[in-house]
């Protein structure tokens, strides 16, 4: 077969032909596609019969888009969130994925979630992205009307939507310029809450995988937990898997670092005396 291709001026290695035959690789480059067209002639097949079997080559933006999981698999409150996203005219994935996220959560003397601050680098996987949607999910019973958001750098606050029954606040963080596919933005922002009951965990959902995540939870010296444990969860309806303890360090803070995030849920849970 290689010899007969060479007679038509098409040079293809035996290894490449073997990989194509076994489905380990697919012809993509122009010269490879010429080889496929020549194979159709050599094998006396109808024109384009082999080429039609090749899946469309993904665009650069699609190739840059990491593995993802839909919101509905991560949050029980997904219907409320979907309604807010539709109202804000946002596509399901927002056109952005996280490269690095450093998040600091503060638990107050009343064991309530006081605030959380984020420094987050995001990358666009399509052209024209000009905003990021920050989502705050408070503890059951929180008062979403009292939750506030501040943008410290790299963005400014746009529209804010609240869903009291779901305990969800969604806010636009607007960029100064539209991002092209592959470009990044560094965002510095934070939510202030303090309205919920005693908190026993903090959970972060990841629609996209591939980035790095650092979570630090600091506790008021007057209310320190007796134990902190890190967990992960594929979806909100599947069982949690304990990953290991997160001991309290000096000043009453626990943390963990995830080097390569997978789509799903990560979090810290703690026990009070």
Image: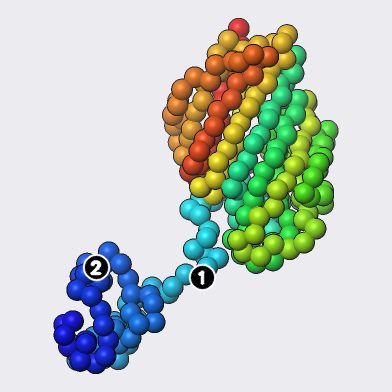
Residue at image mark 1: 59
- Residue 238: assigned label: none
Disc 2/disc 1 C-alpha distance (Å): 23 Å
Helix, strand or loop at label 2? It is helix
Q: Quadrant of the N terminus?
A: bottom left
Give the number of the mark in front: 2 or 1. Answer: 2
109 vs 164: above or below: above
Side of 40 relative to 66 (left or right):
left
Can I make out residue 80 in this image?
Answer: no
Residue at image mark 2: 19
Q: Residues within 10 Å of mark 2 (few under 14, many from 20)?
A: few
Helix, strand or loop at label 1? It is loop
Residue in view at x 59 percent, y 48 percent? 99
Q: How is the image coloured?
A: rainbow
Q: Residue 228 versus residue 104: which sits nearer the camera?
A: 104
Q: Residues within 10 Å of mark 1 (few under 14, many from 20)?
A: few
Residue in view at x 55 percent, y 16 percent? 247
x, y (%) of residue 195? 78, 26
């Amino acid at each position: 077969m290689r010899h007969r291709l060479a007679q038509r001026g098409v040079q293809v290695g035996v290894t490449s032909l073997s990989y194509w035959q076994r489905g380990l690789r697919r012809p993509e480059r122009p010269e490879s596609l010429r080889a496929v067209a020549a194979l159709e002639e050599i094998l006396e097949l109808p024109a384009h019969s082999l080429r039609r079997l090749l899946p469309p080559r993904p665009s650069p933006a699609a190739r840059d888009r990491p593995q993802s999981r839909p919101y509905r698999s991560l949050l029980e409150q997904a219907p409320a969130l979907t309604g807010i996203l539709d109202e804000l005219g946002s596509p399901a994935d927002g056109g952005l994925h996280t490269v690095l996220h450093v998040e600091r959560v503060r638990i107050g003397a009343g064991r309530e979630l006081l605030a959380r601050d984020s420094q987050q680098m995001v990358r666009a996987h399509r052209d024209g992205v000009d905003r990021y949607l920050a989502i705050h999910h408070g503890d059951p019973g929180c008062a979403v009307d009292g939750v506030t958001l501040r943008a410290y750098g790299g963005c400014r606050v746009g529209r804010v939507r609240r869903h009291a029954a779901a305990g969800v606040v969604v806010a636009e963080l607007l960029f100064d310029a539209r991002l092209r596919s592959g470009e990044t933005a560094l965002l510095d922002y934070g939510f202030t809450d303090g309205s919920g009951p005693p908190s026993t965990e903090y959970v972060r959902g990841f629609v996209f995988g591939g980035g790095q995540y650092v979570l630090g939870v600091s506790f008021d010296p007057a209310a320190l937990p007796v134990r902190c444990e890190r967990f992960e969860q594929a979806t909100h309806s599947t069982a949690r898997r304990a990953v290991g303890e997160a001991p309290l360090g000096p000043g009453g803070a626990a943390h963990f670092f995830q080097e390569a995030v997978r789509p799903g849920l990560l979090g810290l849970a703690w026990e009070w005396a």
